[in-house]
Amino acid sequence: MVDDDYNFTFVDIGANSRASDSAVFRDSKLNQGLENKSIGLPENAVIVGDDAFPLRFNLLKPYSRRLLSEEELIFYYRLSRARRVSENTFGILVWRFGVFLRAINQTPDRVDKIVWAACAIHNWLRQTSASTYLPPKSVDVEDTATRDVIPGQWRGQVGELAVVNLRSSNNYRFNAEKIRKRYAEYFVGEGALPWQLKKIGRKI
C-alpha cells in the first residue's frame, strides 16, 4: 500500500507463488488489518484499488466497464487518476532497484529481505533526497492544458507492470456500494473537475 507521495506505507512479503491471487490477498496482513481495522486508517478513509480487488467499505474499486452511466464513467476516471500514484510507486522501485527487472537467484528468505530493504531505502530516499532520487519527469504527470497523461521516465526502462489480480469474498458489499455511490455523486457534484466530462468523451 502506498501514500500520495510515492511512499510505501504497508508491505507484506513472502506468499507462496503457487497460491492464487485471491488466496494471497485473503491471507495477507493487509487484508487482515483492513478487516479488523488495525492498520491505522483515518476515520472514513478508503484505499483505492483496481477492478481486481474486492469492493469493501474501506477499499474502493471501479464499476464494471459495461454500460456505465456518466456518473460511473467519471468515477472510473477519477479513481484511475488516483491509482496512477500506486502504479508509479512500483515502477519507481523497479526502475531504481534493477534487481527487480529479472528473477532474483536467491533463497526465498533472502529475497524477502531484499524486497524489505528496497522498500525501506525507497522511502528513506523519497524523504531525504526526493529531487535526486525522483527527478522531474520521472513519474506520470498530467498536461495542465489537455489533461493528457505524460508517461514518466521509468516506463521507458520498466515498461508496463503486471497487474496483480486480487479477488476474494466480500461480506461488506451493500455498505461498500453505498460508499462508492457517495464518492461517485461527489465527483459529479461538489468535487467535480472542469475537464472530467471531456476526458470521458462527453461534450461540454
Image (tube, helix red, strand yellow):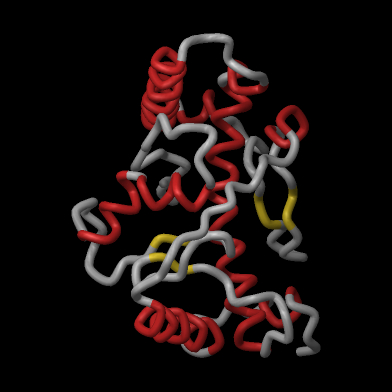
Percent across and percent down for residue 16 are: 46, 32
Which residue is found at the position 36% from the left and 47% from the top?
Answer: 27
Residue 175's place in the image compared with 44, above or below, is below
The quarter of the displayed image where residue 95 is located = top right
Q: Is residue 3 left or right of residue 163?
A: left
Q: Residue furthest top?
A: 106
Residue 107's place in the image compared with 55, above or below, is above
The quarter of the displayed image where residue 197 is located = bottom right
Residue 32's place in the image compared with 118, above or below, is below
Image quadrant for the C terminus? bottom right
Q: Total number of numbered labels?
A: 0
Which residue is found at the position 59% from the left and 30% from the top?
Answer: 135
Percent across and percent down for residue 14 are: 41, 29
Residue 167's place in the image compared with 134, above or below, is below
Which residue is found at the position 67% from the left and 40% from the top?
Answer: 161
Percent across and percent down for residue 53 are: 51, 60
Which of 95/108 is in front?
A: 108
Q: Residue furthest front?
A: 18
Percent across and percent down for residue 93 are: 54, 29
Q: Is residue 41 left or right of residue 122?
A: left
Which of 121/172 is in front?
A: 172
Which residue is found at the position 74% from the left and 74% from the top?
Answer: 199
